[in-house]
Amino acid sequence: MGIKTSLVFSALVWGCSGLALAQNAAAPQDYPRRPITMVIPAAAGGGTDVVGRVLADELGKRLGQPVVVDNKSGASGMLGANAVARAAPDGYTVLVSYSTPVFYAHHMFSKVPYDIRKDFEFITQIAATSLVLMVNANVPVKNMKEFMAWAQQNKGKINYGSYGTGSPGHLMSAYLSDSRKLEMTHVAYKSEAPHIQDLSAGVVSWGMGTLAAAQPQIKAERLRPLAILGPRRLADLPDVPTMAEAGFPDPEFKTIAWFTMLAPAGTPKPILARLEKEAVQIIHSTAMKARLQVFGLEGVEGGAAQFRKDFEASNPIIDKLVKITGAKQD
């Protein structure tokens, strides 16, 4: 064998070996071999944390390795999302997020440290929830008609909270305030748990949030739910009307909030497929549906393709809300 032929043969051997190694590295049969980190871009105790921990528990059982929750709140969820975008794309770091960093951030902020389409792989949507419009128990209103009268009488004096600038709760609250000329002041929190805590304490008078985070305070009668933002009433709040039923038929008030699962761009496709398969099967399960329903959540079973489709379909709606409310941030 001549020198040139030998070099070509060696190159082919090494090339095939490299391909085999790459395929083996991405092979799902030996994944995972160590614990997986699930980054949640919100503080413990909020709706996203509840959803993430339920999923982490079940996913760990199926994968045979612990799924460790890492709460990284701040910057409207972008801090935690960016940490995952910059993580090694090896299947050992995933993001379980609420809507803001995934669906809303690129509409709301001029500087987002990641590109959802380029820096992430979509795995699946996990659950959807309708937001609940709530007031502190000391606010003297019991329905939306009384709420509007109270708001009109106190123009310029009322604060409302949200679980972050650009969150669905922020945009929906701002839309209500702006469209009805109520002149209210927004107070943004890092995530849902501190928002609900201050709303319960009366630091802010009203706000919108998930039943998953607010339910204990509603049961303790520290918060009073007035209306559901979404297409129908919640099973756990059967006496609370939808915004449409309460006299607010605007299509914007039918917006729902998503909880989703993503991985860093470049994560091997077999690993993504394994994560999607296991997560979707968990979401399909009767036990998971029952656990989610307790918190006013519905499982979303579409997988990566449906997630991407819903993501693209949401863009014009969110863009409209941002423009209407003037909520764009520099």
Image (spheres, rainbow, N blue to C red):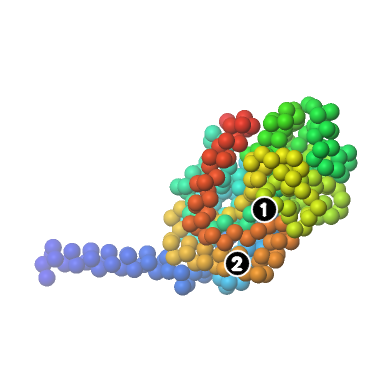
9 to 232, vertically: above or below: below
Q: Is residue 167 left or right of residue 319?
A: right
Residue 194, disc: none
Q: Name the amino acid, label 1.
A: Thr
157 to 206, vertically: above or below: above
Q: Nearer the viewer, residue 247 or 10?
A: 247
Q: Is residue 153 left or right of residue 56?
A: right
Q: Nearer the viewer, residue 43 or 216?
A: 216
- Residue under the point 45% across and 47% down: 118
- Residue under the point 87% across and 50% down: 221
Residue 3 placement: quadrant: bottom left
What residue sits right under mark 1 in the picture?
129
Q: Is residue 198 visible?
A: no
Q: Measured from the top left, where is residue 173 in percent x and y?
A: 71, 38
Q: Measured from the top left, where is residue 54 in percent x and y?
A: 67, 63
Q: Is residue 141 visible?
A: yes
- Pointers 2 and 1 in contact (CB under 8 A)? no
Q: Is residue 131 left or right of residue 112?
A: right
Residue 10 placement: quadrant: bottom left
Q: Secondary structure at mark 2?
A: helix
Q: Nearer the viewer, residue 122 or 65?
A: 122
Q: Secondary structure at mark 1?
A: strand
On the rendered image, what quadrant is the C terminus found in?
top right
What residue sits right under mark 2 in the picture?
284
- Residue under the point 66% across and 65% down: 289
Q: Measured from the top left, where is residue 204 in percent x and y?
A: 80, 38
